[in-house]
Amino acid sequence: MRTSSFGFPPFTPAVKKLVYINVGVYLAMWVLGATSPGTVDKIALYFGLVPIAVVHGYLWQLVTYSFIHSTTSVFHILFNMLALWMFGSTLEQDWGSRRFTEFYFFCVVGAGLVTVAMAYTHLLGMRTDVPTVGASGGIYGLIVAFGILYAEMRIFIYGIFPIKAKWFAIIWVGIALLGTLGGSQGIANVAHLGGALFGYIYLKMLPRRGMQIAVSEGYFGLRNRYHKWKRRQAAKKFEVYMRKHDRNEYFDEHGNYRDPNEPKRKDNGEGGTGKWVN
């Protein structure tokens, strides 16, 4: 666990791509907003997170909403990109680009799903036809991960006030919770909390090496079990055939051939002379 002071980390590859895409989309929408405000509204409805649209098949919105930021204030995207750089680059250095990207979008999609579900409760005046935009769901996931993994590291707020990472994460999640309960931009704060929740779930409940490796290992394990089962079935059929012709060749319970002229050996639990099937 790191305990040193936290400064600005290097601009890592995946973080750099995410920042460039977000800033590029922001500038494009800012230009469109000055020339064609109606087009900006259409983009927000088509690529932002609109709960009723997601339910009716616009599933891409669970990802694309994170690349769209309001052009009415620069502080929204400025804070998100600064946090993405500060916390994301540190995590990417430790995890690698693949796992970092997987984690980030796990939080983005998780925040989107929570937002959609909560919108249909209509609590705190939430509506299903109002778009949610911004990368804050993914950012809150990064903040929670940083607070857990580097709990004792000191962060300097405004470059002056030191605070441990764990308290920084708790404070930011608390602010989002109070904002939700207070009805101030309720649905946006729900997205923040959703991202924080899924960041916690990823760290505490999913395999340490990431979902992609876990799914890959599960797939190949299932495939190997299937091939072993097919071998056993084929061996049983062949054994029946050989017996009908008064032959003594036989197979063991794993589908491996055993020479009847050799003495029977004890199974060591590895399937006799069988090999791992890929």
Image: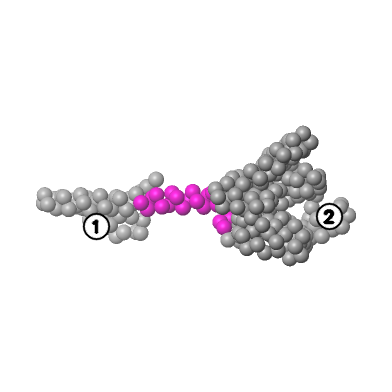
Is residue 174 one of those drawn in magenta?
Answer: no
Q: Position of residue 216 (x, y in %)?
A: 49, 48
Q: Along the line of sight, which residue is nearer the eye, 173 or 40?
A: 40
Q: Is residue 56 left or right of residue 148?
A: left
Q: Position of residue 1 (x, y in %)?
A: 71, 58
Q: CA distance from mark 1 to mark 2?
A: 71 Å
Q: Residues within 10 Å of mark 1 (few under 14, many from 20)?
A: few
Callout 2 amino acid: Phe
Q: Is residue 18 visible?
A: no
Secondary structure found at label 2? strand
Quadrant the C terminus occupies = top left
Q: Earlier in the sequence, mark 1 or mark 2?
A: 2
Q: Along the line of sight, which residue is nearer the eye, 168 or 172?
A: 172
Q: Magenta residues?
A: 206-226
Q: Residue at x 13, y 50 (%)?
A: 247
Q: Residues within 10 Å of mark 2 (few under 14, many from 20)?
A: some
For the stretch drawn in magenta, the main secondary structure is: helix
Q: Position of residue 30 (x, y in %)?
A: 77, 38
- The numbered dot on residue 264 is 1
Secondary structure found at label 1? loop
Q: Along the line of sight, which residue is nearer the eye, 84 or 221?
A: 84
Q: Nearer the viewer, mark 1 or mark 2?
A: 2
Q: Residue at x 11, y 49 (%)?
A: 245
Q: Is residue 238 left or right of residue 82?
A: left
- The numbered dot on residue 156 is 2
Q: Is residue 186 visible?
A: yes
Callout 1 amino acid: Lys
- Quarter of the image holding residue 23? top right
Applied colour scheme: one colour
Q: Is residue 125 left or right of residue 117?
A: right
Q: Position of residue 163 (x, y in %)?
A: 82, 60
